[in-house]
Amino acid sequence: ETGVTQTPRHLVMGMTNKKSLKCEQHLGHNAMYWYKQSAKKPLELMFVYNFKEQTENNSVPSRFSPECPNSSHLFLHLHTLQPEDSALYLCASSQDSGGGTDTQYFGPGTRLTVL
Amino acid sequence: ELKVEQNPLFLSMQEGKNYTIYCNYSTTSDRLYWYRQDPGKSLESLFVLLSNGAVKQEGRLMASLDTKARLSTLHITAAVHDLSATYFCAVDILGGSEKLVFGKGTKLTVNP
């Protein structure tokens, strides 16, 4: 595998379910990101992890819970979601050199539908 | 709060024509990115612009940055159908943060 991979690619879940999204980067980067892409809205940053530490939580509801066990893996745990949470969830990674944001490389995304 | 505005949001053009997509942002920034997204696919990095007056070209696409005007342009020359996609600009918040703010995207359709 190369680049940034995400699983599953598609997910349908009920509002009472618990599920997790997985992201893995094979680029040796030290920063990882979760974004939400909804129709008619700009790409929204959700969480940023740098060297496994969360450095940004963009006022995301607690029904989304990120986990970063190491610099290569990032999870997004989902529970009691709402239909308006249906969206494409994108993971990205970059090399944080301390001098500003380096180019972020995106995974293919998980298309989430909440019924 | 940094705001990023792209226009137009939708662009339909004929093959062989030229056009420009604009990206305005509201506060000082030191980096600007252009990405491309094909339907059902992820974002692909096109250009990184790091300084005032920076210009980068790849094939039929050319991007430029004017930090004084807080404006970047993505110019399309002699469009071909393969360029049909959604193009996003993203701006780095000044200060070494990892945070990017994206525009809404410009959906480009190139017709034969």
Image (spheres, rainbow, N blue to C red):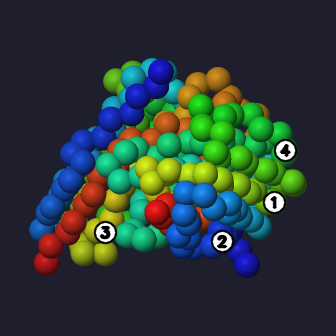
Q: Secondary structure at mark 1?
A: loop
For residue A78, which quarter of the picture? bottom right
Please tell me which of labels 4 and 2 falls first in the chain. Answer: 2
Residue type at mark 4 is Phe
Q: Are marks 1 and 2 on the same chain?
A: yes
Circle 2 residues within 10 Å: few <14, some 14–19, many ≥20: some
Q: Are marks 3 and 4 on the same chain?
A: no
Please tell me which of labels 1 and 4 falls first in the chain. Answer: 4
Circle 3 residues within 10 Å: few <14, some 14–19, many ≥20: some
How much space separates mark 1 and mark 2, taking CA atoms? 14 Å
* Mark 3 in CB contact with mark 2 (< 8 angstroms): no
**x and y, in percent, of residue B81 in the image:** 24, 75
In terms of depth relative to the viewer, which is nearer, B29 or A10?
A: A10
For residue A11, which quarter of the picture? bottom right
**x and y, in percent, of residue A13 in the image:** 55, 66
Residue A51 is tagged as 4
- What residue did someone put label 2 on? A7
- What residue did someone put label 3 on? B83
How much space separates mark 4 and mark 2, taking CA atoms? 22 Å
Residue type at mark 3 is Leu
Circle 4 residues within 10 Å: few <14, some 14–19, many ≥20: some
In terms of depth relative to the viewer, which is nearer, A2 or A38?
A: A38
Residue drawn at (40%, 44%) of the image: A42
Q: Report in which chain the residue with disc 4 lies.
A: A
Residue A72 is tagged as 1
Please tell me which of labels 1 and 2 falls first in the chain. Answer: 2
Q: Are marks 4 and 2 on the same chain?
A: yes
Q: Report in which chain the residue with disc 2 lies.
A: A
